[in-house]
Amino acid sequence: MLVLLLAIGAWQLARNPATHAFRTLLCATIAGQLLLHLLIGRETFLYSMHFAPLLIAAAACGTLGRQRALVLAMTAGLIVSAGVNNWQQFARSTAIVGAIARDAAEQGAVFQPADACR
């Protein structure tokens, strides 16, 4: 769904001559970020927040054409499905952290507040 949103946004940017300056800026910024992160490191998760606003802007351009209702419906579906996925991943991660804490406590580890370590 996300790829389709980006494709519709890119299509609208390409066909609309009024968005030429914005299209140039957006494409140059995305290309610059990609080049920068390819040269600097492989930790793409850490750099994902640099790309997210740019990709959202590209997908939002899909609302400029006749597919506005479709794009908005797909966006609503993406928000719901991403929210469900994020909740499931959060539940998994808290279960993993809880298991690690239980194992450490069974082995005699003592947890203290961070400011107690000074």
Image (tube, rainbow, N blue to C red):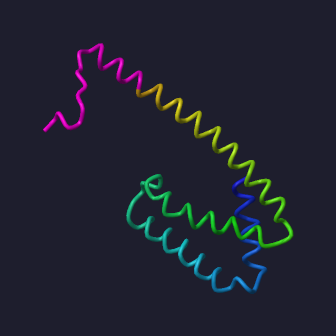
Give the magenta part as a residue range.
98-118
Q: Quadrant of residue 65?
A: bottom right
Q: Looking at this view, is 49 or 117 the one in front?
A: 117
Q: Quadrant of residue 25?
A: bottom right
Answer left or right for 58 relative to 70.
Answer: left
The structure residue drawn at horizontal position 24% and vertical position 32%, both measured from the top left corner, is 113
Answer left or right for 15 relative to 88.
Answer: right
Dominant secondary structure of the residues highlighted in magenta in the image: helix
Q: Could you tell me residue 84's position as x and y percent? A: 65, 38
Q: Could you tell me residue 103's position as x and y percent? A: 34, 18
Q: Does 24 sit above or below residue 34?
A: below
Residue 12 painted magenta: no
Q: Can you name the residue that lies furthest to the top here? A: 106
The structure residue drawn at horizontal position 68% and vertical position 48%, both measured from the top left corner, is 79
The structure residue drawn at horizontal position 20% and vertical position 37%, both measured from the top left corner, is 115
Residue 110 painted magenta: yes
Answer left or right for 106 relative to 8.
Answer: left
Quadrant of the rendering where the C terminus is positioned: top left
Q: Could you tell me residue 95's position as x and y percent? A: 47, 25
Q: Looking at this view, is 72 or 52 the one in front?
A: 72
Q: Could you tell me residue 15's position as x and y percent? A: 78, 80
